[in-house]
Amino acid sequence: MHLLLIEDDALLAESIGSSLRQQGHVVDHFSRCSDAAHSLSLVNYDLVLLDLGLPDGDGSQIVKLMRQRQDATPVLMLTARDSLDDRVRGLDLGADDYLTKPFSLIELEARVRALLRRSQQRLQNVLSLGRLRVDVDSAMAFVGEEYIELPRRELNLLEGLLLNAGKIVQRETLEQRLFGFEAVGANALDVYISRLRKRLQGSGTEIRTVRGLGYRLEEADG
C-alpha cells in the first residue's frame, strides 16, 4: 500500500517508516503541513498517518482539508495529546483512529492493517481473484495452495492490481504505489509488469495492457 507519514520527529519518523516498509508498504514522509497538503493534492494514498504538532501548524487542519474536499482516505492520528477532548476533537474532524505517543510499533502495524482492511471493505486481509490470492498480513502470494515468492515491489504491484481486479488501473496510480516520489526511469513500471506477468503464468490470471490508460488484472480466458 502507498502510505503518507506526516511527522516532524526525525527519529520516530525513521522508525515508523522502516517498520511499515518492512511490511511491504511504500511510505512518503513529510514533516510540515504545507508539504503534506501539496502531496495529498497530487497523490491518491491508501492511508495517512498524521502527527498533530507540526512546525507550521496543527495537523488536524490536514484532516479538515481532506474531508472538505471529499477525500475519504483513512487517517490515523499520532500524537502526544492524550486528553479525551483532544481525541474527540480529532475524531469529530474526520480522523478514523487515534494512537497516543508513546506507542509500540506492533500496535501501530495492527492499527494500520485494520484501517486498510476497513477502508477496502474486506473482512480479512486477503485479496483474491480466482485461484490467485495475497495474504496482506503475511505479505505472501499463493496460487491455490502453492506459494509464489515475490519481491516487495512486485507484491505491492500485485496488491494494487488485485484491489481493482477487473478494472483499469492507471499507470500513474501504479507508479505512485511502487515508487512514491523516488526518481525512476520512464519504463520502470513496464519492467515490473513484465516480471510479474512471468510469475503469474499458470495462475489462471493475466495482466492486460489497456493502451493509453493502464493495466487490468483479470481471469485468463479458458
Image: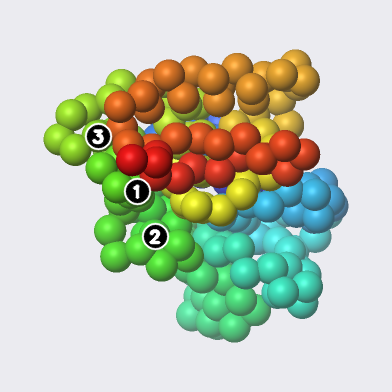
Q: Indicate left or right for 187 with 219 as reference.
A: right
Q: Residues within 10 Å of mark 1 (few under 14, many from 20)?
A: some
In this rendering, the answer to whether 144 lies above or below 82 is above
- Labels 3 and 1: the sequence-earlier one: 1
Secondary structure category for the residue under label 3:
strand
Secondary structure category for the residue under label 1:
strand
- Labels 2 and 1: the sequence-earlier one: 2
- Labels 3 and 2: the sequence-earlier one: 2
Mark 2: which amino acid? Answer: Arg
Disc 1 designates what residue?
129
Between the residue at mark 3 and the residue at mark 2, the CA separation in whole angstroms equals 21 Å
Q: Quadrant of residue 151?
A: top left
Q: Residues within 10 Å of mark 3 (few under 14, many from 20)?
A: some
Question: Percent x, y for residue 38?
Answer: 83, 51
Question: Percent x, y for residue 184?
Answer: 73, 19
Q: Quadrant of the C terminus?
A: top left
Scheme of colours in the image: rainbow
In this rendering, the answer to whether 204 lies above or below 4 is above
Disc 2 designates what residue?
117
Secondary structure category for the residue under label 2:
helix
Task: Give yes or no for contact between labels 3 and 2 (Cβ–Cβ under 8 Å).
Answer: no
Q: Which mark is residue 34?
A: none
Q: Residue at x 31, y 32 (%)?
A: 203
Disc 3 designates what residue?
143
Mark 1: which amino acid? Answer: Leu
Q: Is residue 175 visible?
A: yes
